[in-house]
Image: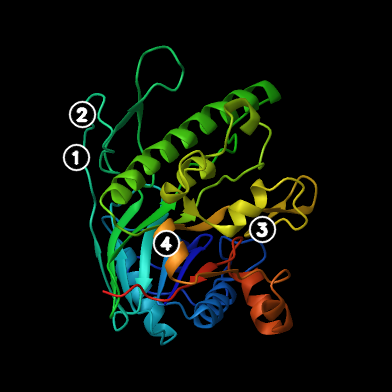
């Protein structure tokens, strides 16, 4: 079985109000890329990826006038993809949904949110992800109210002939200081955003702990907007959000595993993995970062012979040698897919 996560930049802008592809030469929301160019590139990437299920981050919008499920299934139909069934959880207001596009002949999947909408006082059980999480962010003995602008997608997934497992699709809060007018304001907003991002990751980890306590295999995958050693504010808070979700301070049996996160945490890492590439207009350069992860619980890591891959156009030899795929990856999004191939646990 192959599972993947893929953040598609401005996927929503490629569809009209009837959830049909706008396959023309008008500009997409990507820099110097038309809609038809981005659509064609995405078709090449999804076809090459050939995953049984893809957690699509920044999936097409769902709301009063649009349906992310219909849009994704129309996209799959346009390219005759075997991943032709879409699943979306709680809607959000950002035009960036979290969705699963999957092959219904290979797996069964359903949205299965856990927890109560409001967390009971001092409860270790995480509330539902469209609800409210209470955490003292400012160390003032007063709980702060935490919400997700993009509630994680919780899925009960059963592969054909395999053991059921839990999937959690994530798009954690960005730490970028959007709207800052000066350096001091940028620092304040960055620290505030990091507090919220870490709180979201603590919330996620509580949900993971609940699944592990119930002996349920769990996979957390998506865009964390964070990672070990990613910015200077990490030292202020002691660890990254990725390390919190991994449970790096817990016994090995309770930890999640992702080799790219492990590589980033290693001292003096020889090769730094990256899953995204952003254009910096100010300096006219490209910035690379490791933001996208597929984290496996210890039982899955030990018993499924997992093989991870970042579909990076330059760093993955097979992608680099395939000129059409290399170009498509650069055209399709500012993130690259991350996949894991796994043997199935017996049902």
Few, some or many residues within 10 Å of mark 1 (<14, 14–19, 20+): some
**Res 274 label:** 3
Q: Residue at x 67, y 38 (%)?
A: 231
Q: Residue at x 25, y 43 (%)?
A: 128
The answer to whether mark 2 and mark 1 are in CB contact below 8 A is yes
Q: Marks 4 and 1: which is nearer the front?
A: 1
The answer to whether mark 3 and mark 1 are in CB contact below 8 A is no
Q: Considering the image in quadrants, where does the C terminus appear?
A: bottom left
Few, some or many residues within 10 Å of mark 2 (<14, 14–19, 20+): few
Q: Residue at x 60, y 62 (%)?
A: 30
Few, some or many residues within 10 Å of mark 3 (<14, 14–19, 20+): many
Q: Residue 11 location in percent, x, y? A: 47, 64
Distance from disc 4 to disc 2, alpha carbons, whole Å, reads 32 Å
Q: Which residue is mark 4?
A: 59
Q: Which residue is mark 2?
A: 120
Q: Quadrant of residue 205?
A: top left
Kind of element beneath mark 1: loop
Residue 163 seen in the current view: yes
Distance from disc 3 to disc 4, alpha carbons, whole Å, reads 21 Å
């Amino acid at each position: 079985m192959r599972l993947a996560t893929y953040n598609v930049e401005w996927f929503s802008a490629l569809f009209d109000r009837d959830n049909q592809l706008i396959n023309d030469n008008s500009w997409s929301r990507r820099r110097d890329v038309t809609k038809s160019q981005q659509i064609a590139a995405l078709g090449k990437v999804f076809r090459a990826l050939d995953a049984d299920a893809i957690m699509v981050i920044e999936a097409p919008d769902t709301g009063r006038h649009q349906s992310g499920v219909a849009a994704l299934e129309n996209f799959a139909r346009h390219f005759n993809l075997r991943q032709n069934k879409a699943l979306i959880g709680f809607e959000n207001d950002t035009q960036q949904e979290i969705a699963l596009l999957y092959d219904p002949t290979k797996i069964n999947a359903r949205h299965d949110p856990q927890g109560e909408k409001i967390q009971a006082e001092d409860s270790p059980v995480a509330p539902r992800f469209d609800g409210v999480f209470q955490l003292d962010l400012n160390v003032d003995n007063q709980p702060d109210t935490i919400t997700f602008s993009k509630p994680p997608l919780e899925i009960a997934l059963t592969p054909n002939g395999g053991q059921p497992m839990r999937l959690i699709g994530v798009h954690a809060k960005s730490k970028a200081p959007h709207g800052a007018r000066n350096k001091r304001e940028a620092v304040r907003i960055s620290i505030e955003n990091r507090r919220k991002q870490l709180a979201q990751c603590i919330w996620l980890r509580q949900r993971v702990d609940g699944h592990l306590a119930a002996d349920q295999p769990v996979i957390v995958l998506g865009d964390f907007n964070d990672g070990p050693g990613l910015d200077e504010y990490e030292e202020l808070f002691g660890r990254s959000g990725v390390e919190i979700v991994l449970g790096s301070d817990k016994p090995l049996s309770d930890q999640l595993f992702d080799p790219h996160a492990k590589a980033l945490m290693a001292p003096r890492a020889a090769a730094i993995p990256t899953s995204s590439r952003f254009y910096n207009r100010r300096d006219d350069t490209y910035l690379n970062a490791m933001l996208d992860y597929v984290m496996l619980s210890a039982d899955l890591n030990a018993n499924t012979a997992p093989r991870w891959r970042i579909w990076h156009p330059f760093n993955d030899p097979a992608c680099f040698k395939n000129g059409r795929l290399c170009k498509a990856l650069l055209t399709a999004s500012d993130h690259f897919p991350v996949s894991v191939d796994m043997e199935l646990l017996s049902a």
